[in-house]
Image: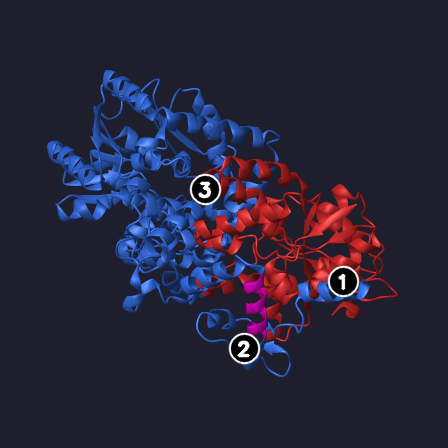
Amino acid sequence: MRVSLFITCYNDTLYPETGRAVVRLLERLGVQLDFHPRQTCCGQMHANTGFRGEAFSQAKRFVQLYRDTETVVIPSSSCVAMIRDQYPGLFEELGNETLRNDFAALAPRVFELSEFLIDRLGVEDVGSYFPHRVVYHASCHGVRALHLGDRPYRLLAKVRALDLATLPNVERCCGFGGTFSVKNAEVSSAMMAAKLQDVVSTGAEYCTALDNSCLMHLGGAMHRQYAAMKTIHLAQILAATEESPVEALA
Amino acid sequence: MTQPASDKVILDPRFAPPFPQGALNVLRNPQLRKNVAHAIDVIQSKRGKLVAEKTDWQELRSAASALRAHVLENLDAYLEEFEARCTAAGGEVHWAADAAQARQIILGLLRQEGAREVIKIKTMTSAEIQLNPFLEAHGVKTYETDLAEIILQLGEQEPSHIVVPALHVNRAQVREIFARRMGLENLSDDPQALTAAARTYLRQKFLTIPTAISGANFLVAETGSVAIVESEGNGRMCLTLPRAMITLAGIEKVLPRFGDLELMLQLLARSATGERMNPYTSLWTGVTPGDGPQRFHVVLLDNGRSAMLRRPVERQTLRCIRCAACMNACPVYRQTGGHAYGSVYPGPIGAILTPQLMHLQHAQTLPYASSLCGACYEVCPVKINIPQVLLELRAQVTNQERHQAARFLDPMYLGLRIANFLFARAGRFHLAQRFGRIGIRLFTRRDGWIHSLPSIGAKWTQTRDLRGFPRQTFHEWWAARDKEAK
């Protein structure tokens, strides 16, 4: 199977190890990977801040780059949610017939990583090994926009030696919210403090998620507070094996 | 107890501080935050249990959403039907285009009654038009009869929630207010003692004041009826003892048929208070000789609603039945409570309703008072896609602001403009990544982390670190690997 990886702008710049993990994981599962060198951003940051015209240009760019692609995989649920929930409205308002048709044909072939593994590849056990206590942060877009449900948990359950902690108030927002984290920095921080309390109470060594954006926010606070916990994208846990642990990707 | 002027709560979007500042006042008040979090946790857990027992909850939501959407599509016809039926039953219907007109109509009706005092059933719509201060300024004393509203009125406080307006006040604070204002020095903070004190206070008002004002949960077009749902029965007292009743209702409150209440009441009680059925549901139709108020007026309020009706995305805001499930579910509201929103309508629904009621001339920070987590949409019994409306309003605010000279150097606007320029071509984006990587070294400590950034970045680093930029981007790694493979 051929898959084109849309890495997202912030993973490309700030979290390349997540991208490398996706590559290692999918290639291990026999997937042939492409990477479109002209990719940049899905437009979410602009759309969510009210810059609709700018968001539209990026959305259009995404569709034009990927319309001939068999399958697109994105290791970020909020970017997938942007594409599924906001592109139709943007194209309805600002796009033309061709763009709308191209998008309608492309949309069902765009997958978030856990969706791709479970729904498209039909695997839960991806052969990983991660001997740590881990807590899963269910990001809002994963839960309420993509309806990922138990997919991430099914993947985590099959990771050998992994001890999965239960997170209280698991569906409550961590307070990141994109530009919300700076436009309403104080409220965002108060929400983060509440989330960290729940996350740290689990006694896990790692907090994982399918969005590095939430993890940047939570991990940044953990680092500031010298908390006994680190953040790690789920792709990195799934990529880790006994022979080649997670550190090899760092 | 005097408070610094900056802490004064203003629930008027024209004068209230922007949301981030209003929120900051609350964030520094642990007592208030504890009260709010405790109260909504209690309601949320009750709601969760009762929603779970309805196996057809999603079907009920779909039906209610469709019904409310249908009403809005045909609002003119249903309002005229309501007016005709209500008039035929002995009521009198008045139309108010805005808050000022509604206040004048109500004052005129009270003067007609010769009323110097009036008792009130809890109504957010009267708070929306700032009725109480207006009436007091014109010589009519207002008495709230809902327990929470009494607490606020006697304590000279502002509502922070639309269903439980005094949820930011705890029992000890209620005791203090009642003891001081009712002259009961030995009052205990036992809930029974507090409600008994309120009852004594209220009975005297019910028995002596013959004029009442109410809001409406629903208007029924088919019968011309008005419905009020409540928990305490004080509304029922206002509906039986007075000689005259004036009901103030937003034009969106109408339902087509009496039978539609069956659907709406199931959703409302569970969503609002986590009860299968609210304790008191009062329905009245015009005037019944010898029973209840003998003069009955309905004031139908537009106040920006028909402008909302014209806009296809924002229109859904008017489906709202004021259950407050969205604010109870909102992680932002959980931290800030209601006062931060600077409006009588707080929380997610307030964040979309208030700016629209203000014709987007005030409250422009409210559409941004959300992390877009979607919890509000998930619980909304009439399926208002609040995040979608927030985004629509954000786009309007941005269009309004982006051409203002002051915004040109605003770091957020500038940053997003530059980002858009960079994202348009991969070459530009990659060049910016390379320069950014060098530039950020200035701020990166030896441990590889950034602890402090200037300008808008400081908003991030005031509570969080940021990992320094890695030496190689993903696309650089991919290109190098590709080359090696060849």
Instruction: Kindly identify the amino acid type of the residue bearing the numbered disc 2.
Output: Gly
Q: Which residue does the image show at 15% across and 38% down from the upper left?
A: B104
The three-letter amino acid code for the residue at tag 1 is Asp
Q: Which tint was used for chain A?
A: red
**Of helix, strand and loop, which mostly describes the magenta segment?**
helix
Q: Is residue B457 above or below residue B71?
A: below
Q: Residue at x 74, y 41 (%)?
A: A119
Q: Is residue B296 left or right of residue A137?
A: left
Helix, strand or loop status at disc 2: helix
* Picture coordinates of residue B251, whole percent (x, y): 30, 31
**What is the count of numbered marks?**
3
Question: Looking at the image, do the residues carrying marks 2 and 3 touch, with CB atoms under 8 Å apart?
Answer: no
- Quarter holding the C terminus of chain A is bottom right
List the residue tagged with mark 1: B482
Q: Disc 2 and disc 1: Cα gap in Å?
A: 28 Å
State the residue in front, B425 or A115: B425
Where is residue B270? Give x, y as percent.
51, 36
Please name the residue shown 82% across and 67% down the image: A245
Foreground of the two, B130 or B468: B468
Amino acid found under the numbered disc labelled 3: Leu
Provide the chain ID for the residue under circle 3.
A
Q: Which image quadrant is residue B82 in?
A: top left
What range of the chain is rendered magenta?
A: B427-437
Q: Secondary structure at mark 1?
A: helix
Q: Farthest top residue?
A: B88
Q: Which mark is residue A94?
A: 3
User: Who's the residue at 46% across and 57% down the image?
Assistant: B35
Q: Is residue A49 something that shows in the picture?
A: yes
Label for residue B439?
Answer: 2
Is residue B466 highlighted in magenta? no
- Identify the hue of chain B: blue
